[in-house]
Image (tube, rainbow, N blue to C red):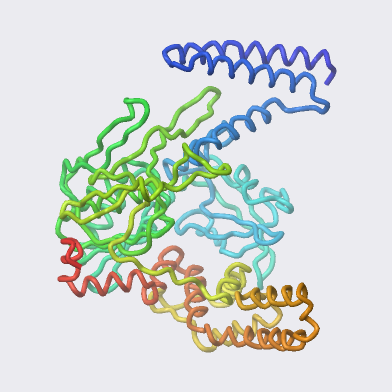
């Protein structure tokens, strides 16, 4: 591009910016810092013009603006985001849970792109695609060198349109599939069922449209089927639509109950949200499971259930997101999600843990203990603000063993399950399926040429010792002993497979069962060894303990 053409372009950009600046200035006429806003908009447009006109290399105006927008919003909080027209489909998915596509998730695995999970009942699964299938081409276009995010425009599209996918199926060979895209709706409740003959279980993974109806229908169905107790699992649920959180609380509490209040800088964002419908059941004993991944709408539900003493919370302290985002439609079909308020649950507490208005080294700081306040539930139990939602029964986090963690991270469990599914047509129902001794023996044989190395804390300590010995000139006298210790670690690691057979078998059973029974298996196969669920069952078997917790007598 010549300097003259650059000049013409910069003039056109400037003529576009001038009215924008003017409109922006009008919007801020009633704001005390009008001059500061107007001045900085003018500075920005000047910098933009000079870079576009004079920078040594060719620049892309759209990219410059996007970088500027993203950097500006990042200085606020992680939840205020801008979405270009090209990102509109992903943006809508956040709120509706629906999109046009084949109904499968895809991920990078090393240099390959693989089907991670086909959704049951949708085109990918119906056509026969399986988890572990390696993508080769889409509509004849190679996927080599692409990232999973690059495939959106190839796999997503209008319902009813066709797409041809070629894959390499491990252990079988190359296969071609012709699929017709459909409208995909990812369920908020991917599973509900009975843990035993008295306890119903509902897994809630999202808060998109109709989440409240899905929980309502699940609870009603379980109770009608004989459930005397209910578990609502919110672990790992990062939240979503606020009004759906209210609808879910409404399943278990009376109509016209205040659930959440929002307060923002703009008084228009100060609102109260109350339940609107007749509940499904006000009396059934209820346990809500939460963890550090339970955030936002999940914390509204769990926190409100706690504040109203309607159920017992089990797990670990939740994430601590007490901020409300509002959707805004912008020009040229762009969108943004902006934090407009904080929310407060019935006790009056706000569970927001990080203070984004005050940062240290660019990172938000946690609310100081001295600033936290005590609030009270309906039964006068003490609860705190500023730290997320603390469960009534706190469960210690049990980390995976080093060997199990390595087998997961390196996709060795995933790959073995892929070969297992491609070799064996059917297995027992997910609740009953267990990895047999033969299966585990086959798995150990499979491991012989696989790299599943990992570093233990003891090995790291030994590395530190070796370095200190070297620094202090003791290494020569200690080297033989250090080498012997390293050798013993190698043999111990080989024994780790057998030492952690139970843990590895459980993980392997879940991975294998999911290839046959999809989301149902991911839940049902863990019932027997899920510590939080087992604690809930113990609590339901001791109703006096359950009631005493809610009365603050535990």
Q: Nearer the viewer, residue 279 or 128?
A: 279
Residue 193 image position (x, y, % from top left)? 31, 65
Residue at point 54%, 86% (across, down) = 499
Residue at point 47%, 72% (across, down) = 510
Q: Nearer the viewer, residue 374 or 134?
A: 374
Above or below residue 276? Residue 107 is below
Residue at point 37%, 72% (across, down) = 531
Viewed as shown, does residue 229 lie left or right of 385? Answer: left
Residue 9 in view here: yes
Q: Nearer the viewer, residue 85 or 80?
A: 80
Residue 154 image position (x, y, % from top left)? 63, 45
Most extreme residue toward the right is 2
Viewed as shown, does residue 29 lie left or right of 259? Answer: right
In the picture, which quadrant includes the C terminus?
A: bottom left
Residue 224 in view here: no
Q: Quadrant of residue 443?
A: bottom right
- Number of numbered tags placed on the structure image: 0
Residue at point 43%, 56% (across, down) = 293
């Amino acid at each position: 591009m010549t300097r003259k053409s650059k000049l013409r372009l910069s003039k056109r950009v400037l003529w576009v910016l001038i009215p924008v600046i003017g409109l922006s200035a009008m919007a801020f006429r009633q704001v005390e810092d009008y001059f500061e806003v107007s001045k900085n908009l003018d500075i920005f447009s000047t910098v933009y013009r000079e870079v576009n006109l004079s920078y040594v290399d060719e620049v892309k105006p759209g990219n410059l603006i996007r970088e500027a927008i993203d950097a500006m919003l990042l200085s606020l909080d992680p939840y205020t985001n801008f979405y270009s027209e090209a990102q509109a489909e992903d943006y809508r998915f956040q709120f509706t849970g629906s999109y046009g596509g084949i109904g499968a998730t895809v991920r990078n695995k090393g240099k390959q792109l693989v089907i991670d999970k086909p959704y049951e009942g949708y085109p990918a699964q119906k056509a026969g695609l399986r988890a572990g299938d390696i993508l080769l081409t889409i509509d004849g276009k190679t996927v080599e060198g692409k990232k999973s995010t690059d495939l959106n425009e190839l796999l997503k599209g209008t319902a009813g349109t066709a797409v041809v996918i070629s894959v390499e199926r491990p252990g079988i060979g190359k296969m071609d599939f012709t699929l017709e895209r459909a409208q995909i709706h990812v369920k908020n409740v991917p599973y509900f069922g009975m843990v035993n003959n008295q306890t119903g279980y509902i897994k809630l993974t999202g808060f998109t449209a109709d989440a409240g109806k899905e929980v309502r229908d699940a609870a009603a169905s379980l109770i009608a089927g004989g459930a005397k107790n209910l578990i609502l699992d919110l672990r790992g649920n990062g939240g979503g639509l606020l009004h759906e959180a209210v609808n879910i609380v409404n399943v278990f509490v009376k109509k016209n109950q205040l659930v959440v209040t929002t307060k923002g800088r703009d008084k228009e964002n100060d609102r109260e949200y109350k339940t609107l419908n007749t509940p499904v059941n006000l009396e059934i004993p209820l346990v809500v499971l939460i963890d550090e991944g339970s955030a936002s709408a999940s914390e509204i539900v769990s926190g409100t259930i706690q504040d109203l003493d309607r159920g017992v919370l089990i797990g670990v302290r939740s994430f601590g997101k007490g901020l409300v985002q509002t959707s805004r439609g912008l020009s040229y079909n762009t969108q943004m999600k902006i934090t407009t308020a904080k929310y407060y649950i019935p006790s009056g507490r706000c569970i927001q843990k990080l203070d984004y208005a005050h940062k240290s080294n660019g990172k938000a700081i946690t609310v100081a203990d001295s600033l936290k306040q005590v609030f009270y539930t309906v039964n006068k139990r003490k609860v705190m603000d500023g730290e997320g939602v603390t469960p009534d029964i706190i469960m210690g986090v049990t980390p995976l063993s080093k060997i199990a963690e390595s087998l997961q991270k390196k996709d060795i469990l995933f790959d073995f399950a892929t070969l297992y599914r491609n070799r064996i047509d059917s297995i027992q129902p997910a609740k009953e399926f267990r990895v047999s001794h033969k299966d585990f023996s086959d798995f150990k044989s499979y491991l012989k040429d696989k790299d599943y190395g990992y570093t233990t804390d003891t090995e790291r300590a030994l590395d530190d010792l070796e370095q200190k010995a070297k620094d202090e000139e003791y290494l020569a006298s200690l080297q033989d002993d250090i080498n012997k210790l390293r050798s013993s670690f190698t043999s111990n690691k080989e024994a780790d497979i057998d030492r952690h057979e139970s843990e590895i078998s459980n993980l392997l059973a879940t991975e294998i069962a999911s290839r046959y029974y999809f989301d149902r298996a991911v839940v049902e196969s863990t019932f027997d060894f899920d510590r939080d669920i087992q604690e809930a069952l113990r609590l339901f078997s001791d109703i006096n303990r359950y009631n005493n917790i809610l009365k603050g007598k535990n």
